[in-house]
Image: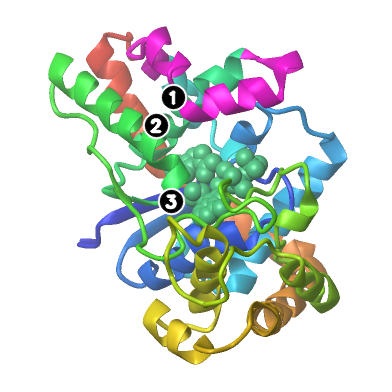
Amino acid sequence: MDEKKTLYSAIQPTNNLTIGNYAGAISNWLKLQDDYNCYFAIADMHAITVRQTPAELRQKTLATLALYIACGVDPQKCCLYIQSHVPAHAELCWVLNTFTYVGEMERMTQFKDKSARHAENVNMGLMDYPVLMAADILLYRAQYVPVGEDQRQHLEIARDIAQRFNNIYSPTFTVPEGLFLKVGAKINDLQDPAKKMSKSAENPNGSIFLNDGKDAVIRKFKRAVTDSGAEVKYDPVNKPGVSNLLSIYSIFAKKSIEEAEAEFAGMGYGEFKLAVGETVADSLAPIQAEQAKLLADVQYLNTVLKNGAETAARTAAKTLYKVHKKIGFYQI
Ligand code: ATP
Ligand code: LTN
């Protein structure tokens, strides 16, 4: 009998992943994969809520899987799969839609942001995004969901939907909890430290992609916006730029913020930014090499995906069956 608790998370294959995705999501997964029964998906169904180029989506999907593994997510320990390979996600989403109010979805920050950014394509999927995410999590009866700070509101809605359903029928869904890191849960844009670093940002100079070469990484860090004053000190309110760089350094150098501050005491911003850039670039190099190796072996990646989808579908089908029974769908 498997005593481990279940953990679920996913990333959209919308572009190359950034160090924000690494810091807020993947680095946390690595710490948890030994102790939990983990499902890590590639959320391609979420990705199409914003228009994608088909060939690129296909390529990024496989690249995301390769990156998960290259970062250290172990397919022997975790179930890695593509969301669209398990139809139960769409099926449960439909049912959960009938337990979700339009007003709730209209209030979601990400919906408001993305509708403004993609005013020409405010589609139903964009609005329904959080319900599909709730379906993802609830299908696997996950207790924990490690995500970045930006997903907190979506997680709250997933909890509300689960509780609503459980109250109307009987306990069916596990009510999930978010796992947020203290450091790294929100890495900000290097050019605009008031904004979160995002893989689909308009200005690529504000984001460090996990596949950026050393030159690009150093160049972007050198250009990073800092604050007035000259002291390298962690103070997110008054020094958002410097604090963001300290958080990034702390994650990649595997040191506490205090240790990082001590290390850079008395150093100028220029030298500090270069040191952060060097550390990040050196940490990314082996991940990039491993990702390239994995991408050269598509057969292996396909096997991981096939096994992952089978395992996921088995668990998902059980939950979906229970839900269908409770709501009164006729079963043969
Ligand atoms: P997009 O720009 O396409 O909307 P994104 O970069 O915001 O994408 P997601 O696929 O939405 O990335 O998020 C994947 C995971 O990475 C989530 O757990 C999210 O919370 C986390 N994440 C994304 N950006 C950051 C960030 N800047 N800091 C910390 N965590 C982040
Ligand atoms: N919306 C998430 C990606 C995502 C997710 C999930 C995260 C899709 N389904 C289920 C956790 C659990 C995002 O990070 N943008």
Near-viewer residue (85 or 331): 85
**Is the C-beta of the residue carrying label 3 under 8 Å from the nearest atom of ligand 1?**
yes
Considering the numbered disc 2 on the image, is that residue within a helix, a strand or a loop?
Answer: helix
Cα distance between the residues tagged 1 and 2: 5 Å
> Which quadrant of the rendered structure holds the C terminus?
top left
Q: Residue at x 65, y 14 (%)?
A: 123
Residue 108 lies within the magenta run: yes
Residues 308 and 204: in front is 204
Amino acid type at mark 2 = Ala
Q: As rendered, which of 10 and 39 lies closer to the eye?
A: 10
Return the mark for residue 131: 1
Q: Is residue 27 magenta?
A: no
Bin the neighbour count of mark 3 within 10 Å (Cα to Cα): few under 14, some 14-19, many 20 and up. Answer: many
Q: Position of residue 274 (x, y in %)?
A: 71, 81
Q: Tell me the amino acid under the disc marked 3.
A: Val
Disc tally is: 3
| Stretch in magenta | 95-123
Residue at disc 1, secondary structure? helix
**Residue at (30, 69) in percent of width and height:** 35
Q: Is residue 216 above or below residue 281?
A: above
Tell me which amino acid carries mark 1: Val
- Crowding around mark 2 (Cα neighbors within 10 Å: few <14, some 14 to 19, many 20+) is many
Residue at the (55%, 68%) spot, across then down: 242
Using the rendered view, name the quadrant where residue 87 is placed.
Answer: top right
**Quick check: 261 above or below 224?**
below
Please, what is the dominant secondary structure of the magenta stretch?
helix
> Which residue position holds label 3?
147
The chosen color scheme is rainbow
Q: Which residue is mark 2?
A: 134
**Which image quadrant for residue 68?**
bottom right
Q: Verify CB contact (< 8 Å) between mark 1 and mark 2.
A: yes
